[in-house]
Structure formats: C-alpha cells, structure tokens
Image (cartoon, rainbow, N blue to C red):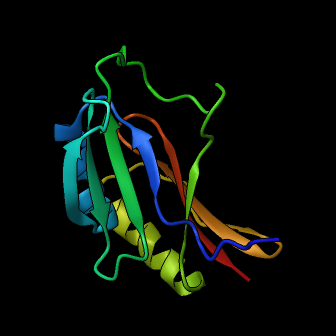
C-alpha cells in the first residue's frame, strides 16, 4: 500500500480574513506564505506557515458563506490538533494563550498524552497535544 509521510496542510473556512489572519499569526506565530483567489474564481485564501514550513494553515473565505460560527457537531471538520515536542512545551503554549487572553483549557493529562484546547475567532476547536 502507498504511504503518506505527513499532513501537508490544513485549510479551514473563516468568516473574516481581516480578523482571522492576525489572530493565527499572533497566537500560533505563523506568517503569510501566499494568498490568492480559489481556482474557480470564487473565494479567496491566505496560507500561513511556521518558519520551516512544517505547519501550514490555510484560511479560506467563500462568498456563499452565511457567516455562521463553526460547530463540530455538523458533518465535516471536528477539530485540529497541533503536535508539540513534550509536556514542557505544552505548558509553555498554555502560558502563551493566557498571556494573549485566549480562552483555553488547562493542561489535561491523560494516559499517553496531554492536551490544551482552545478556539479560533470562528469557534473552530484547536488543540496543542504532547504525546507520552
């Protein structure tokens, strides 16, 4: 069977690029890699990445979007989890979210992993997760 090496990027639909792009840049430390219209000519996207391009997040807007907030209970994306190196790094992210005023869970230690959960401006659930 052919194999995948990693997830290349995750793309999400947002209601307001002018709000979401700065939020993802500030909170996740990502920078703009590219921006363009969708190939079919409708909608627009901004691709953000970290310095070594190991994390890429696309933010998309569509003219047909009615502006409703994200809900993981609908068919489609449930949440996005970002891997961090270890528990200490997870704790550093928890502190950063607090410093930025981003509502988040405390570090939740589970058997085999620990996680911090937070949400973007459109209510999309994001997580930092440390395995081990």
Q: How many marks?
A: 0
Quadrant position of residue 110: bottom right
Whole-percent x and y of residue 2?
75, 71
Whole-percent x and y of residue 97?
37, 61
In the rendered view, does 108 fall on the left or right side of 26? right
From this view, report whether residue 108 is shown above or below residue 77. below
From this view, report whether residue 59 is shown above or below residue 51. above
Whole-percent x and y of residue 87?
59, 82
Residue at the spot 31% in from the left edge and 28% down from the top edge: 15
Quadrant position of residue 100: bottom left
Whole-percent x and y of residue 81?
57, 60
In the rendered view, does 60 fall on the left or right side of 19? right
Q: Quadrant of the C terminus?
A: bottom right
In the rendered view, does 21 fall on the left or right side of 59? left
- Of residues 31 and 35, the one drawn nearer to the viewer in this rendering: 35
- Of residues 21 and 117, the one drawn nearer to the viewer in this rendering: 21
């Amino acid at each position: 069977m052919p194999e995948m090496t990693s997830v290349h990027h995750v793309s999400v639909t947002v209601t307001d690029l002018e709000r979401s792009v700065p939020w993802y840049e500030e909170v996740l430390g990502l920078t703009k890699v590219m921006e363009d219209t969708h190939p079919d000519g409708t909608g627009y996207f901004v691709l953000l990445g970290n310095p070594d391009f190991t994390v890429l997040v696309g933010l998309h807007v569509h003219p047909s979007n009615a502006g409703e907030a994200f809900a993981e209970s609908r068919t489609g994306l449930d949440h996005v989890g970002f891997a961090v190196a270890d528990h200490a790094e997870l704790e550093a992210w928890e502190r950063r979210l607090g410093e930025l005023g981003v509502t988040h869970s405390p570090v939740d230690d589970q058997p085999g992993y620990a996680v911090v959960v937070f949400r973007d401006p459109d209510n999309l659930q994001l997580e930092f997760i440390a395995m081990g």
